[in-house]
Amino acid sequence: MNNLFSEIYGCYYKVVEEIIKNSPVTEDEIREIVKQCGYEETCFHFFPLLNKLPFLEKKGDKYYSTLEISEQKKNFSFPLTNIEKSWLKSIVQDERFPLFVNGKTYENIVKKLSDIEPLYDEKMFRYYDQYADGDEYKNKYYIKNFRILSDATDKKIPVKIIYQSTKKNKISVGHYIPIKLEYSQKDDKFRVYTIKISDGKRLDSVCLNIGRIIEVKPSNKTYKGKIDVELDMKIFERLEHAEIEIYNERNAIERFMIEFSTYEKSSEFDEENNICRTKIYYHKKDETEILIKLLSFGPTLKVISPDRFVELIKYRIDRQYDMVKGKLFFSGGK
């Protein structure tokens, strides 16, 4: 099992697995299994071996498994190959992995893979355009909150969330039903999509950054409405738009088109003013990422509308200015 592709995942092993799972089986039923899981010539090679297999016993016109254990039939599995163990070792080393398993399970996995070399190391990867202030995945409170939210997301049950605002100057308390967890590669953060509830009714659809959640507790509130994840997520995925002017400086137009190549756009070039006017369409849930990308272009573009989006741009610029001014003040700079 040292090779990249192991024969235990070949068609003969799959045929035997299905025979054991479905035993007792007749020769006709075995032939049908072979046709479904193998190739045209598989019957020719397989049937001469049928009576020699140690885990099958023929009684009358049927073949019975000598491994006749109900639990074994339900959970029939193959051993891991070395390449799979190496891949798993790499996954376990990811600092986000403990979020999805409890402490004891995590320790057992680490122990069993202690003598396995990882397939790759996190240091092999270099991320561009990713924020450096990602979530604190090793924080015990973050891990606890994440696991409670994950469980509530699976069960679609209400939780009480104590949440801190972006500026960390306001704390809010509310009752929510988590419907989906999502990871942002750009921000290196997890967020949770929720339905905010009160008195058994829906108040709003809210997306929360898990890193800003102070505490998650079981809620004594109930929700009388119906939860349809696909339908509820459409609220977050509704299309918004922003109108932008891009100045033909520092190759900005070409860079803009490449950066936003995956988004729907309508553009026209004003040759007289040497400006490209573009309307870009995006999902509401991607708005923060759009803002970050636009700000990275600096003075080579201008957001025209809608007013709400313009205000968001202004807010982020003011916030960055205040942060820089604060750093200069404390460092004694001018």
Image (spheres, helix red, strand yellow):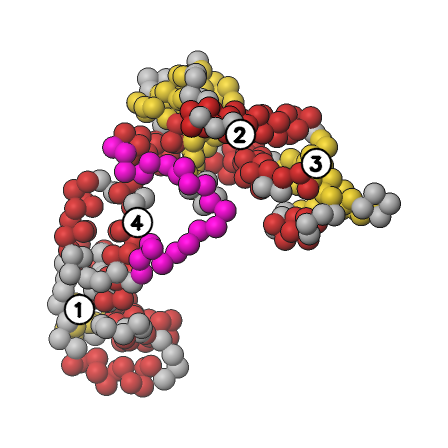
Quadrant placement of the N terminus: bottom left
**Residue where numbered disc 3 is placed:** 302
Instruction: Tell me if residue 131 is in the magenta stretch.
Output: yes
Name which residue type carries label 4. Asp
Q: Calculate the distance from the C-alpha at mark 1 to the C-alpha at mark 2.
A: 72 Å
Q: Is residue 29 visible?
A: no
Query: Which residue is more in the foreground, 326 or 215?
Result: 326
Q: Residue at x 42, y 28 (%)?
A: 331
Mark 2 or 4, which is nearer the eye? Answer: 2
Highlighted range, magenta: 120-140
Q: Which residue is drawn at 39% across and 81% down?
A: 40
Q: Calculate the distance from the C-alpha at mark 2 to the C-alpha at mark 4.
A: 31 Å
**Residue where numbered disc 4 is placed:** 94
Q: Residue 64: which disc?
A: 1
Upstream in sequence: badge 3 or badge 1: 1
Q: Is mark 1 on a helix, strand or loop?
A: strand
Q: Which residue is drawn at 17% across and 77% down?
A: 53
Q: Is the magenta stretch mostly helix, strand or loop?
A: loop
**Residue where numbered disc 2 is placed:** 320
Q: Residues within 10 Å of mark 4 (few under 14, many from 20)?
A: few
Q: Calculate the distance from the C-alpha at mark 3 to the C-alpha at mark 1.
A: 74 Å
Q: Calculate the distance from the C-alpha at mark 2 to the C-alpha at mark 3.
A: 17 Å
Upstream in sequence: badge 1 or badge 2: 1
Mark 2–mark 4 CB contact (< 8 Å): no
Where does the image place residue 125, in percent across and percent down from the top left?
A: 39, 56
